[in-house]
Amino acid sequence: MNGVLRTVNRVLLGLAGLVLLCVGGGVLAAAAGLSVPSWWPWYGKNDVLLSEADRDRWRGEGWWWPTVIAVLAVLVVLALWWLLAQFRRARLNEVLVDSGDGEGALLRGRALEGVLAGEADALDGVARAQVTLTGKRSAPAARVRMLMEPHAAPDEALRRLSDEALAHARDSAGLARLPAEVRLKAVKHRAARVS
């Protein structure tokens, strides 16, 4: 996801820059009285960007304003999606493992996430666990979400997660530390009837 977002950012910024450069350069060239192509909508120093006829042309059409509003709404939604995507924490694709030869080896982040989630799932009282690695590949951090059964003891589950699952992952990857943010959520269940 991180690589895709970086590519989308570069393409969007490149296209926006190219459009702004071309339009701005053309308007400046026309305003300076320089020669512009015949298809260019503005020709000279006294030409305006939108004439009165252009502004009034579509006013009587019933489809014009709904189309303008729909296009602008789509652009706003896309811009908000892009803005929110910038703030999302990127998932770590790989972790640098100390192999002892000074160079290190790369471990797939999803593999380590899967192992951590599997160990967390196996803990007593945990219905389901999700793990996401964030941070740098040389200093990863884990975000763990655990769905707890009604009979679970959260303090015991946290202690075992820290002492077992996170310790195993830290030791196997040769990391000095593996900080974790853990979020617990209870499984929704019906109240038990007492008769």
Image (cartoon, helix red, strand yellow):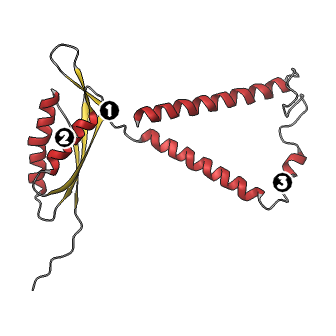
Look at 11% across and 36% down and name the residue there.
168
Whether the residues at callouts 3 and 2 have beta carbons within 8 Å, the answer is: no
- Residue 115, disc: 2
Mark in front: 3 vs 2: 2
User: What is the CA distance from the residue labelled 1 to the residue labelled 3?
Assistant: 51 Å
Compute the Cα span from label 3 to label 2. Answer: 61 Å
Q: In this view, does 122 lie to the left or right of 55?
A: left
**What x and y, as percent, mark residue 31?**
85, 26
User: In which quadrant of the rendered image does the N terminus lie?
Assistant: top left
For marks 1 and 3, give the one nearer the viewer.
1
Amino acid type of the residue tagged 3 in the rendering: Trp
Q: Could you tell me which secondary element the residue under label 2 belongs to?
A: helix
Chain-order first, disc 1 or disc 3: 3
Report the residue marked by disc 1: 93
Quadrant containing the C terminus is: bottom left
Q: Earlier in the sequence, mark 3 or mark 2?
A: 3
Q: Say whether disc 1 or disc 2 marks the residue closer to the N-terminus.
A: 1
Task: Determine crowd level at label 2: few under 14, some 14-19, many 20+ residues with C-alpha closer than 10 A.
Answer: some
Say which quarter of the image contains residue 36. top right
Instruction: Name the spot of residue 134 as percent of width and height, x first.
Output: 30, 36
Horizontal side of residue 69 vs 136, given as left or right: right
**Label 1 to label 2: alpha-carbon separation:** 15 Å
35 or 130: nearer the viewer: 130
Q: Residue at x 15, y 39 (%)?
A: 166
Mark 2 residue type? Val
Q: Residue 58 carries which label?
A: 3
Helix, strand or loop at label 3? It is loop
